[in-house]
Image (cartoon, rainbow, N blue to C red):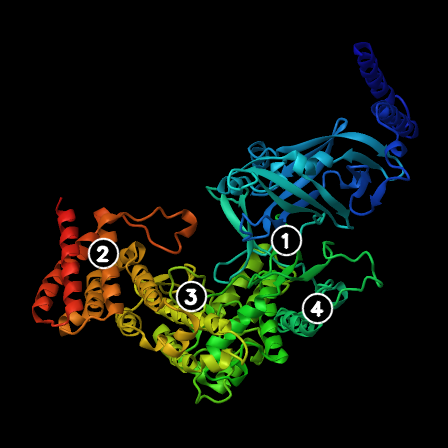
Amino acid sequence: MICKHKFLVFFFFFALNSINKVNSQNREELIDAIREANEQNSTKDLKDYKEIINENTVTDLGLFDVHKVDENFYFEINDSLLNREFLMVTRIVKMAREIPLSRHKMSEQVLRWEKFNEKILLREASYSVFASDSLPMREAVSNSNFEPIIATFSIEAKNKSKNSLLIDVTELFERDVKSFGFPQSSRKTYNLSGLDTKLSFIESIRSFPLNVESRHIKTYRSSNTKNGVVSMVLNNSMILLPKVPMKRRYFDQRVGWFTTSQTDYGIDNQEAETVKYLDRWRLEVRDEDIENFKNGELVEPKKPIVYYLDRGTPKKWKKYIKQGIEDWQAAFEEAGFKNAIIAKDPPTKEEDPDWSPEDIRYSVVRYLASPSLNANGPHVSDPRSGEIIESDINWYHNVMKLLRNWYFVQTAAVNPKARSTEFEDEVMGQLIRFVSAHEVGHTIGLPHNMGSSSAYPVDSLRSSSFTKKYGTAPSVMDYARFNYVAQPEDENVVLTPSEWESPNVGVYDKFAVKWGYKPILDVSQDEEIKILKSWIIEKENDMMYRFGSAGIDPSSQTEDLGDDAIKASEYGIKNLKRIVPKLIDWTTEDGETYDELEYMYGQVLSQFRRYMGHVTNNIGGVYQYYKTADQKGAVYSHVDKSFQKACLIFLNQNLFKTPLWIIDKEILTKIEFAGTINRIRSMQSSYLNRLLDFGRIARMIENEALNGDQAYSYIEMMSDLRKGIWNEIYQFSKIETFRRNLQLAYIERIEHLLKNEQDYVSPSYRNYTTTIKVSQSDIRAVALSQIMTIEKDLSKYLKKTNDQMSKIHAQNLIIKIQGIIDMNRS
């Protein structure tokens, strides 16, 4: 072997020397001869292609030709696809019941297939850090970002007719390749250990023109299950990325958008900068339409966004799902495109037997027979540019039950069409249309805009003309749902987004799509950024164009309407009070059980809880309005003192004062033998604990430190709360059962404040709370002062009350409080 290698080296240098002594034509011939000799030498140990791939082989032609030989799977990779980027997306298809399936997509990574000597390497390419090829920094970035090798494969054979290489990939999908399996972090959560290879195998590998789909069953050992294992079905989608990445459009937090990020070391700053760019479809003007586009005419894109409906979609709902998709055409017209987004039925099996929703060329609304009350719209994007490659909307059958619940509890008081547990098809169809539009919004790049609904005055939502023109929120991407503010005397008020003048697409949605998608031709990247910023500044004083993300900001809440949580909730509660006496009539039929009555009664209570949450979040709330340095005003500002105080009074009157309207004996005697006392206790204590939360109190203390008398202080809030919850001891009146439970819950929460530190707050949750060192703050001193005051007032109450149970309760509370005080003395 040594002699042979020496001969080859000698021959190689001899050949190189000879090349310089011959003319151009002969030089090319000599190079070809050398290449052929090298190929013959490198392939002499390979099998003949036809020895492996023969008439017994099952072949699926596509991006990679996939061959199944007995139980083995082979990829046939064309030379042209070596060193190209592929996006690998790992999804869960089916999951064992022991592990809740909260999400389907588990991971994404960019892969590259490379030839090295006589092997094929599968490497993970990284685009998280970057520097332009033209910059000296590029080498340093490359050196600190070496791309790991996931797997190596021997070349089994070569197909000279196709310039392709054959490799055996069976073990890649049968073995525990962690990049393509159940995530390591999730394995720890559910105590999953190694892969049981005897119970793991490939189910199928299919190839399409732009993607390869591999489905395999993985069985992991588990200490949490009776049989010691957990099985699941995983799917790996390997997608060919475009050779030329799409032009990026850079993110601005004032317009909500799903993004991809990258650390750029090539920017001329004194530190590396994280840049974010939009996830969006590649919508481009056709060459022949550029002049028309520049003249302001609507043009059709080179390639529209097309969604196919799943073949399993019930026929009667197809029309409405399609309408929800194509409602977005109005938004894309603001970006200069007509017919930019289209809904289609899939071809029948007879028309196209090869059509498959797994084919990456097709974005599909997948209709899933699942009890899940949900729908979602994920997408797959190119990490180099943000280009959305494909998106499937997962439509769970039972989302209709969720729509029924919302529509009933939010509109039945004013809407005869909602006064049943089964709606007419047209009614349900329009609700389906709304959800379809919302999920499509996600698939084109838009996240939730929870701040949208706060743009409208509450009383405007009772106006027929206003709601018809502007809807119930400027964005369908808010969780604004249906119009619970409308009252029975309000005529022709719009209740659902499908009734808007521009169905399901609001003012903000049109602006956001224009901002993200309108081509800005013949300008540099920096000039484009300036133009995009100017569009935002044009609308900066109009709240309808505001983007707000959920967090500590009470104007960016889920499930709320309008600019005044108190007023909106008061209207909502009025409607719930109208619904409760009618619940039996609207939810039962002769010969049927009371199951639907029980369920919908629970939905009424859930809606009431939402109203309580909307108001509670204003106490200690901080508004967040995204701004840049050229804009006036604060980014963060505390909720006005008088409004916070009004919110506390609202809670005292509507929640902590026993909501007797909920306790309907006609309903309760038909659905349960017991449970009312615990239900009310649980509801009241839950919101009491939310109110007396360390993070909320921390913001109130800081507000007072910064703004003095203009702030609603922690001590003032505690005083107002005490007067509401302990009202009976100041009025010397009887303390009823529900109130006794609430007062005990109050004492327990005070004890919690005195004994405990704040739980650890993970970085990902810090937009939703505020950290504080409890023992080094005013929290405990004020809490202790409150129960000391209550102890004195209870002693006075004992001398004047004649109710025996109230006396026993007061004596018990005094003993509890004294124990807590003694504990804090030690």
* Secondary element at tag 1: strand
Q: Position of residue 781 (x, y in %)?
A: 17, 53
Is residue 19 rendered to the left or right of residue 327? right
Please tell me how crowded label 2 is: few (under 14), some (14-19), or many (20+) other residues with Cα within 10 Å. Answer: many
Q: Position of residue 436 (x, y in %)?
A: 61, 68
Q: For the residue marked with disc 4, what is the amino acid?
A: Ala
For mark 1, what is the residue?
A: 380
Q: Residue furthest top?
A: 3
For mark 3, what is the residue?
A: 557
The CA span between labels 2 and 4 is 57 Å
The residue lying at 30 percent from left, 49 percent from top is: 758
For mark 4, what is the residue?
A: 343
Q: Quadrant of the N terminus?
A: top right
For mark 2, what is the residue?
A: 750
Looking at marks 3 and 1 on the same chain, the residue that comes earlier in the sequence is marked by 1
Q: For the residue marked with disc 1, what is the amino acid?
A: Val
In this orientation, does residue 234 appear?
A: yes
The residue lying at 26 percent from left, 64 percent from top is: 741
Pick the front one: 533 or 83: 83
The residue lying at 39 percent from left, 69 percent from top is: 673
* Secondary element at tag 3: loop
In this orientation, does residue 560 appear?
A: no
Pick the front one: 605 or 569: 605
Q: Position of residue 31 (x, y in %)?
A: 87, 27
